[in-house]
Amino acid sequence: MEERILQNYINGKWVNSNSGKFREVTNPATAELLAKVPVSTLAEFDEAVQIAQKAYHSWRRVPVTNRIQYLFKLKMLLEEHFEDLARTITLEHGKVLDESRGEMRRAIENVEVACGTPSLAMGDLVEDIAPGIDEMMIRQPLGVVGLISPFNFPAMIAFWYLPYAVATGNTVVVKPSSRVPITMVKMFELMQEAGFPEGVVNLVNGGAEIVDGMLDHPLIKAVGFIGSTPVALHVYSRGAAHGKRVSAGGGAKCPCLILPDADINTTTNIMMDSAFGCSGQRCLAATVAIMIGEADKTFIPAFAEAASKRVTGYGINPDVQMGPVITMQDKVRIEGLVKQGLDEGCEMLVDGRNAVIPGYEKGYFIRPTILTDIPVNGIIHSTEIFGPVLGIMHCNTVDEAIKIVNDHTFGNAASIFTRDGTAAHKFRYEALAGNIGVNIGIAAPMAFFPFSGWKDSFFGDLHGQGKHAIEFFTQTKVVIERWPKEWTRKF
């Protein structure tokens, strides 16, 4: 991929930013410079919003069956360019190619579900709710909406929201992560090819100033965001203070209960993929394994062996199972948290620090790392590490483990591995987390279902994906009609 200066996409055209400020986009496996992304100005962002507002008035009047035709075209283009987009994700993010393919598939699934908007956005009607009176509830779009996407899923997370927003008649301004902007630029090129009318979809690159500008702008009616909890809380609080709808996903600590009766091979394989897939840089990563009873006697050795054998390297190479973390700063931060955990009394089972990959010595690599005996109040359990680090603790009973799950400030996801249906049902019912896995390591909802974080993992009422996204991007209007007999319906 040749180095290039990225542009913004406003009013159906690619335009240069006038800020004169740029950030470098690097390949985390090689430290190679891939592109420079502009730090756009608030004036440029306002231009995009004004254009989107103008486009909204005509776009909302386009019949929904016509609006989704653009999504059908986009779906076909995403399929046609599937491998190129997956490769781009790997180049700028670092995840292995199969993980990038999985991300693209999830993005496309949301386009497919949004094509069902004519059914999903149906209202309600009660005929003769009173003598001579009919009453109905209809859904109408909000206006201009803003989306802020994180670095860990350059394609997927924006598409938890974007297809539903445009299908329901809104116009959109997207701010991608400046760490991984190339993928979204390519996806917008395909939206341009799909023929979306000018101003319906817009992209503005930038930093925190653009985020705050989005939260403050009076024409932005709703904001979708996924990121860390401190930033999610900021987005929610500031956006809500300006009267906006906000769907803000935050951090996570996704515990997995391992019961002694769980299948050792299946559980080990799933846990390794869950803990170390995407180098642990995802909010559904299995970051804590809670061994119940005597499960630790068999599963800890199995985890150690599997983690030690996991192949770390450049994600483009087909034999690689785990890529680098996103930046050198993140590598230093993660290794520092591991050291702090050891200082607090954790035991090192598998040490992946100071990793050097032959041929990729400049890359930001950490091999799979496992710590045991992690204290409940220690840094490894309390903090979202966002790296390839798995902590292990022990509980005597499922009840004791559920209490640990429920006492945590995060509530994004939690899983249980067992053959015991009673234990699984108890966990599913009592665990305070929005996404529950039973013999599933990554409890990621399909596009039909919302991504349901709880507690400090989510701020707002409605989540991305599926029916929730349809509701998030529409407002209800109740219409009450009376037609007196002496009047006529001749029109």
Image: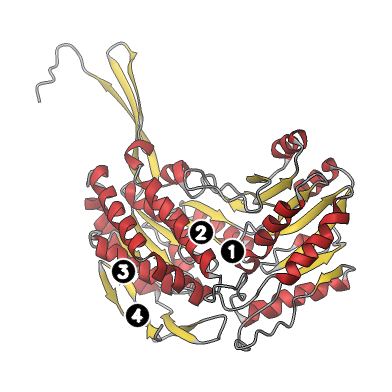
Kindly identify which residue carries mark 3.
Answer: 189
As shown in the figure, which amino acid type bears the numbered disc 2?
Phe
Kindly identify which residue carries mark 4.
Answer: 17
The one of 37 and 374 positioned closer to us in this rendering? 374
Question: x%, y% of residue 401?
Answer: 82, 46
Sequence-first tag of 2 and 1: 2
Sequence-first tag of 4 and 2: 4
Label 3 crowd bin: few (<14), some (14–19), many (20+), radius 10 Å: some
Question: x%, y% of residue 445?
Answer: 55, 47
* Rendered image: mark on residue 258: none
For mark 1, give the secondary structure.
Answer: helix
As shown in the figure, which amino acid type bears the numbered disc 3?
Glu
* Rendered image: mark on residue 225: 2
Q: Is residue 253 visible?
A: no
Q: Is residue 251 left or right of residue 168?
A: right
Kindly identify which residue carries mark 1.
Answer: 231
For mark 4, give the secondary structure.
Answer: loop
In three-dimensional space, the C-alpha distance between marks 4 and 2, rounded to whole angstroms, equals 23 Å
Sequence-first tag of 1 and 4: 4
Sequence-first tag of 2 and 3: 3
As shown in the figure, which amino acid type bears the numbered disc 1?
Val
Q: Disc 2 vs disc 1: Cβ atoms closer than 8 Å?
A: yes
In three-dimensional space, the C-alpha distance between marks 1 and 4, rounded to whole angstroms, equals 25 Å
Look at discs 2 and 1 and give the one toward the viewer.
2
Question: x%, y% of residue 34?
Answer: 45, 83
In three-dimensional space, the C-alpha distance between marks 3 and 4, rounded to whole angstroms, equals 17 Å
- Residue 29 is drawn in which quadrant? bottom right
Label 2 crowd bin: few (<14), some (14–19), many (20+), radius 10 Å: many
Q: From the image, which quarter does the N terminus lie in? A: bottom left
Q: Is residue 383 visible?
A: yes
